[in-house]
Image (cartoon, rainbow, N blue to C red):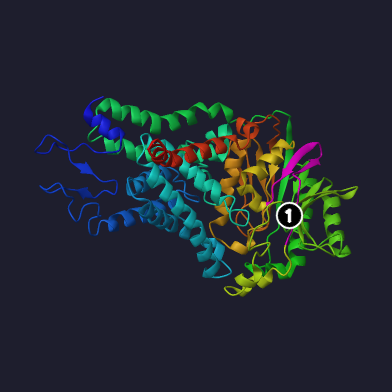
Amino acid sequence: MSSSTARVAENEPPQPPGPAGTSAVTADSGASGASGASGQASPDAGRPRKGAWLPRTAGAALAGALLYLSFPPRPLWWLAPLALALLAGCLYGRRARAGFGLGLVAGLGYLLPLLIWTGEEVGPVPWLALVALESLFIGLTGLAIALVSRRPGWPLWAAAVWVAGEALRARFPFGGFPWGKLAFGQADGIFLPLAALGGTPLLSFAVALCGFGLYATLRIARSAPRRTTAVLAALTVAAPLGAALAARPLVSDSPQAGTATAALIQGNVPRLGLDFNSQRRQVLDNHANRTIQLAEDVKAGRVAKPDFVVWPENSSDLDPFAEPDAYGVIDGAVKKIGVPVAVGSVLAPQTGPLRNTMILWDPVEGPTTTYDKRKIQPFGERIPMRSVVRLFSSDVDRVRRDFGPGKKPGVFDMAGSRIGMVTCFEAAFDDAVRSTVRAGAQVIAVPSNNATFGRSQMTYQQLAMDRVRAVEHSRTVLVPVTSGVSAVIRPDGKVVQQTKMFTPDALVAEIPLRSTQTPATRVGPLPEYLLLALAAGALSWPLLRRIRPRRSA
């Protein structure tokens, strides 16, 4: 390897030789360090150039904005690697403090527009608080990327660090908030088959590695030999793309256990916003009436008779076990259609928390099996630190009684088909979906309620998430929503039917039943754990190098 190539490997651009045949040294911070004739450092050595922070800050903000634009409803998935390449240019060789600040700026540019729907009905304070908290995690990710960028092969370590940041956000605080993972913006992208190989962590890793590798390749192309540039490009850009192409045979929508005809009901809500709950009976009537209309369409031969029907989350916020009137409305609709129906309801026991429950309702036996939602949305279905949060928003008192989580996956036997229940917010969590498929689900149902988020992009972001889950576990995903967009998603991630927003409708589709498990389903969290170990090793290496000389001394 030539001397110039060796410098590139150590992240140091080649410098022209000085008068004495030595080379100048560039500080990690990016500032030039010059020495006077006396050999003493200049007073300005190691200091960043005045105003140098401005273009990097603007670049970090632009990188965040490009990441946002890569997400649905826009099919601009390819912007994500470009955004990370730009972010890498801002973070490369920076000190830890600068890395945190630039990561924070990128997080704000990314999440402020992405999560604006969280303030749809409750004002800007909750939205800004959530964005600020989540951006802090991206700031920490930027700090870590800046540190590992000084190591040889840094795009690999940086991509692992990005996945580690997403893993942290998915778990802390209050159970985590995985919204905005890179993987969830790739439903239309070339990298999507990797979800079936290693789940969303591997998919995010591939996108991040491609972006960071793109910047590294462009950076060294100016000074390194062509062979070195080609090798780096092959390892960091071409390898993720090649792996995605090689994983395509894992994506299939062929039936393995026959087919079934499924129906989804979108009954709509009487009005937008948080107050739709005050007309709970009207919401229930809407879904019952749309089911009865479906039964009449079947009788008239306009549509095929379904084997089973799935209602959305909160389609009956009236507890049918406590209110005979609600029981009668549901039972009448189920008897009319004559097949099992999964009904989303809120159960209110005399003591303890509320339950967000899916009820399997048989036309002969009535309500049988139930599934309680396991991932409860903080500040939506439960209010942590209620007395503190009330100081910032009185809307917390709309949630007068917290919901409690269920314990076990829910798989309903519906006319011989095993339908796994993953209620709304749960679709964002790897373990919630995976455990349902491992419990024997041949089809995944994601009953949801997006009425409180109006006509925002939230429903399209969630639909893209469901498409990724379809490929990850090779299962049809059924998405019945109270107000839209409801959809039928094939195991290859394609949407074959969908409704319009805030329009009563029913979708009827023949779907494949699949029973084999993808590698992602079988290996579970192992890819994520391996990437976390990779990130931890890269971050601890400089510390270990400092400790060894001290011990020898």
Horizontal arrangement in the rendering, residue 200 relative to residue 363 (left or right): left
Asked whether 413 falls inside the magenta stretch, the response is yes
Residue 454 visible in image: yes
Q: Residue at x 73, y 54 (%)?
A: 405
Within the image, what quadrant is residue 439 found in? top right
Is residue 189 rendered magenta in the image? no
Q: From the top left corner, tell me how far across and down residue 16 is, in percent.
A: 15, 37
Which residue lies at the image location 47% right of the left edge and 57% below the top edge? Answer: 135
Asked if residue 454 lies left or right of residue 150, the reply is: right
Where does the C terminus fall, quadrant-wise?
A: top left
Tally of marks? 1
Q: Is residue 83 visible?
A: no
Residue at (74%, 41%) from the top-left corner? 419
Relative depth, front residue between 217 and 118: 217
Residue on which the image places disc 1: 405
> Extreme front residue here?
553
